[in-house]
Amino acid sequence: MSKQNSQITLDRQHIYIIPTKAGFGLVLALAIMLLGSMNYNNSMGYALTFLLASMALVSILHTHRNLLGLRIELGKVAPVFLGELAQFQLWLDNRGKAARYNLVWQRQQSKQSEIVMDIAADKRVSLIIPVRTKQRGRLFLGRVSVYSEFPLGLFHAWSNIVLDASTLVYPQPLGHRNLPLGQLLENTGEGSPHDSGGDDFIGYRDYKEGDSPRHIDWKAVARGQAWMIKQFGGLSSASVWLTWDDVSMLNNVEAALSQLCLWILLADSQGAEYGLKIPNCTIQPSSGEIHRELCLKSLALYGDNN
């Protein structure tokens, strides 16, 4: 198997083939037919036995060639949040003049269902391998197997493929939707976040007796949800620090990371400039997609010593 960066081409040395149960059954049947033909000196028995044996030998070549020369390239894979399916994309490049049939793909580290596909001659097709995320951090595709029993199902040819494919799994965004406004006041010197002087929506907080009715989220109340207060404060022009101290009371690392993850998504959706302070990592306030991905990556790899 030749490998260059994120590409693999299946060669003869890394394609393995053995008879299937049907293949072993055929071998046994041919042996009995041959013994019978020899015992009774039956020329028609000889002819049928050797005809079936020759068909089996030819099927070995077809089964092996169904994999030989197939080129696999790593495609795109986007980061995901914990609990979502990571979608690993592989490009299958069939540069031969013959189509490939009944190729079966499966990630060996999981018990997920197999993916069966055909590839037309001289075509390049995409294969998506879904992987369920069970913990945050870096997720590797690992070993993928491909096999075929085409055309007669008498032989099983397979190969194992390992590509340098990985993606990030961000913490699951969970927690309350109130941004840590104490940090906002400290850095901007603005007035009370409960005042209505700003026009930008910055989040929700629980309803308290004496709150202005015009700040209540009446749509949520109509849906039977808890009473929440909308907060405005000109956040788009503010710098907010999201720090480990803001989530230290949770006493659970994963819960703390999930809360910070939710705050990052909220601040980003509101156009705020925000910074992140967690142990061994400080990211200065900024905004935009690149900044959001940098902050989420820091949360995903928190505690990773690699």
Image (spheres, helix red, strand yellow):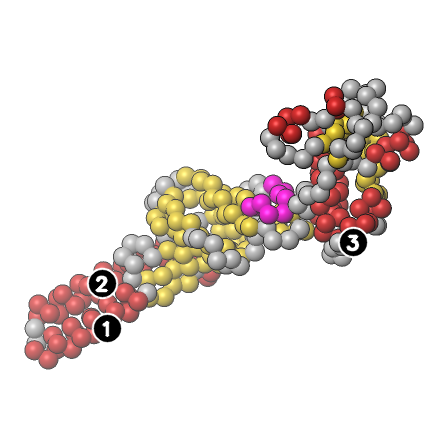
The Cα–Cα distance between marks 2 and 3, rounded to whole angstroms, is 71 Å
Tell me residue 213's x, y (percent): 74, 23
SS at badge 2:
helix
The Cα–Cα distance between marks 3 and 1, rounded to whole angstroms, is 66 Å
Q: What residue is disc 1 on? A: 28
The Cα–Cα distance between marks 1 and 2, rounded to whole angstroms, is 15 Å
SS at badge 3:
loop
Is 44 left or right of 2, judged from the image as shown?
left
> Residue lying furthest bottom in this view?
39
Look at 60% across and 30% down and name the residue there: 223
Q: Is residue 199 magenta?
A: no
The reply to whether callout 1 and callout 2 are in contact (CB within 8 Å) is no
- Looking at the image, which is closer to me, 131 or 108? 131
Tell me residue 169's x, y (percent): 65, 47
Can the viewer see residue 90?
A: no
Q: Viewer-nearest of labels 3 and 1?
A: 3
Is 218 left or right of 21, judged from the image as shown?
right
| First reached walking from the N terminus: tag 1 or tag 2 | 1
Q: Which residues are magenta?
A: 78-86
The reply to whether callout 2 and callout 3 are in contact (CB within 8 Å) is no
- Tell me the amino acid under the disc marked 1: Leu
User: Residue 54, which numbered label?
Assistant: 2
